[in-house]
Amino acid sequence: MTAEPAKVLTKADFESDQEVRWCPGCGDYAILAAVQKLVPTLGIPKEKFVFISGIGCSSRFPYYMNTYGFHTIHGRALSVATGVKIANPDLSVWVVTGDGDSLSIGGNHFIHTLRRNLDINVLLFNNKIYGLTKGQYSPTSEQGKKTKSSPNGSLDYPINAASLAIAANATFVARSFDVNTPHLVETLRQAQAHRGMSFVEIYQNCNIFNDGAYEPIVARPVRDEGVVELKQGQPLKFGKDMNKGIRIHNNQPEVVTIGENGITEKDLYFHDETQENPSISYMLSQMDYPRFPVPMGVLRNIQRPSYDAMVHEQNAQIIAEKGPGSLEKLIVGRDTWEIK
């Protein structure tokens, strides 16, 4: 008797029967389509996927994926994901979160999950606003942002999500945006292939409460000038004619034009996402419009043992040394006392 060949999965296999309920025109639709396009190609059985979210517009995501999932509480998706991955290390765990959910109430969980290097994929939808609660400024809103909660303009300095991830020593940090499906799919593919914590910041448009937040860099007429694509081992070049580039001079990035003042392609920075020292990755993450084009792609990709793998290795070592544990012995062990 021969085994039946494994079913070839398609995008439709990952579309749930739930009505997708985001505002018409929301960037979340494009991200959902990109993820549903990617996951059937990964060679992972459908029952091995888990999507976990917190609270926010992005956190509807698990309902729309025909996989296992959790819609958890505000800022705590990463805590749930930690438990899921440690208890079930063979699962492909994806966390979908927003700039408010992960960087405000969930900020501490965000930092510590990154530094632990848990083998999960975290997708942060950054629309620079609180969309679900109708338009308050968020941790990533620009200074001076006028909203319902900052009618005279926000005084807060915004968090740079990718910079924070690099500073927390994340082993994989990348950035993409909602309306560039090929780039987003490829970035997510690289994130999933990474063994360890993968963090992808996705610039996402909220067309109701913060429409056009990224229009100056990602709109098609300006994208060539507003974005520089990071490619491993390749020089940082951009512009309609690809004649502009980024070089590092006196420990600072600067925009140069190839062919002017003796500048050649060899003078540009050749991207190396695998550098153990995070300083240049951090420097690139800080580049922002209009002074610089915004880097898109993988900023950092290094190898380090994952937290979940080390937990199971440690447990196996202890069992080998002391034998299997006993719950009964733990309950009635020496650390008990009697109240009279």
Image: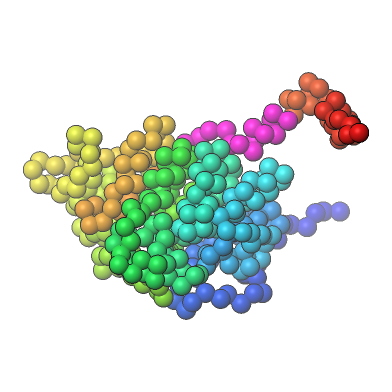
Q: Which residue lies most toward the left here?
A: 261
User: Residue 234: x and y, percent?
Assistant: 32, 43
Q: In this orientation, which residue lies closer to the viewer: 265 or 2?
A: 265
Q: Which residue lies most toward the top here?
A: 321
Residue 259 located within the stretch drawn in magenta = no
- Tell me: residue 150, above or below residue 139: below
One can see residue 217 in this view: no
Instruction: Tell me which corner region of the image, top left, top right, bottom left or bottom right, holds residue 278.
Output: top left
Residue sitting at x 71%, y 46%: 88
User: Residue 258: x and y, percent?
Assistant: 16, 47
- Relative side of 330 to 196, left or right: right
- Relative side of 158 to 250, left or right: right
Colour convention of the picture: rainbow
Residue sitting at x 30%, y 64%: 153
Q: In this orientation, which residue lies closer to the viewer: 285 or 295?
A: 285
- Tell me: residue 182, above or below residue 173: below
Instruction: Tell me which corner region of the image, top left, top right, bottom left or bottom right, holds residue 217.
Output: bottom left
Instruction: Tell me which corner region of the image, top left, top right, bottom left or bottom right, holds residue 15.
Output: bottom right
Q: In which quarter of the image is the C terminus?
A: top right
User: Residue 247: x and y, percent?
Assistant: 22, 41
Residue sitting at x 55%, y 46%: 109
User: Residue 2: x and y, percent?
Assistant: 82, 53
Residue 302 located within the stretch drawn in magenta = yes
One can see residue 257 in this view: yes
Number of numbered callouts drawn: 0
Residue sitting at x 78%, y 57%: 4
- Tell me: residue 296, above or below residue 312: below
Look at the image and give the residue range highlighted in magenta: 301-315
- Main secondary structure found in the magenta portion: helix
